[in-house]
Image (cartoon, rainbow, N blue to C red):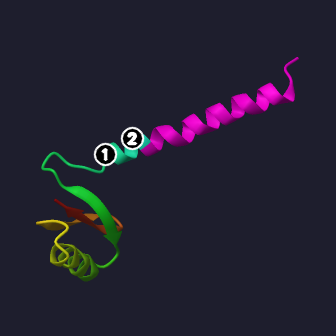
Amino acid sequence: MKSWRSRIAAAVVVGTAVVTIPLTAGSASAADPDGFNLVGGFRDHHICQVEGKALLDEGLYREFQCRWNAPYWEVWVR
């Protein structure tokens, strides 16, 4: 019979892997082939446009796109 300490250690390793794998896979999928990166999402198209323009005005990026991905308008920048 295994001790409680070894069972808890095994559960922590499995739990960490379950959380880490989706997070690393998700960050890789947040960029598209054209070099745009996902930076946020909004329910209203107008707010998406305003936020994208604000990022350009700050000089952080040179262009942005608002893309519909139900139920959100996503801000993509490069």
Image quarter for residue 48?
bottom left
Q: Amino acid at mark 1?
A: Ser
Left or right: where 2 falls relative to 55? right
Left or right: where 1 falls relative to 66? right
Report the residue at 16% width, 67% height from top.
64
Callout 1: few (<14), some (14-19), or many (20+) C-alpha neighbours within 10 Å?
Answer: few
Question: Does the magenta stretch mainly form a helix, a strand or a loop?
Answer: helix
Image quarter for residue 43?
bottom left
Callout 2: few (<14), some (14-19), or many (20+) C-alpha neighbours within 10 Å?
Answer: few
Q: Which mark is residue 25?
A: 2
Left or right: where 62 falls relative to 25? left
Helix, strand or loop at label 1? It is loop
Q: Which mark is residue 39?
A: none
Image quarter for residue 51?
bottom left
Q: Which mark is residue 29?
A: 1
The percent coordinates of residue 30 (x first, y second) are 30, 51
Helix, strand or loop at label 2? It is helix
The correct choice, above or below, for 45 with respect to 1 in the image is: below
Tell me if label 2 and label 1 are in contact, CB under 8 Å.
Answer: yes
Q: Which residues are magenta?
A: 1-23
Which residue in the rendered view is the most extreme toward the top? 1
The percent coordinates of residue 54 (x first, y second) are 22, 79
Which residue in the rendered view is the most extreme toward the front? 59
Q: Is residue 20 magenta?
A: yes
Q: Amino acid at mark 2?
A: Ala
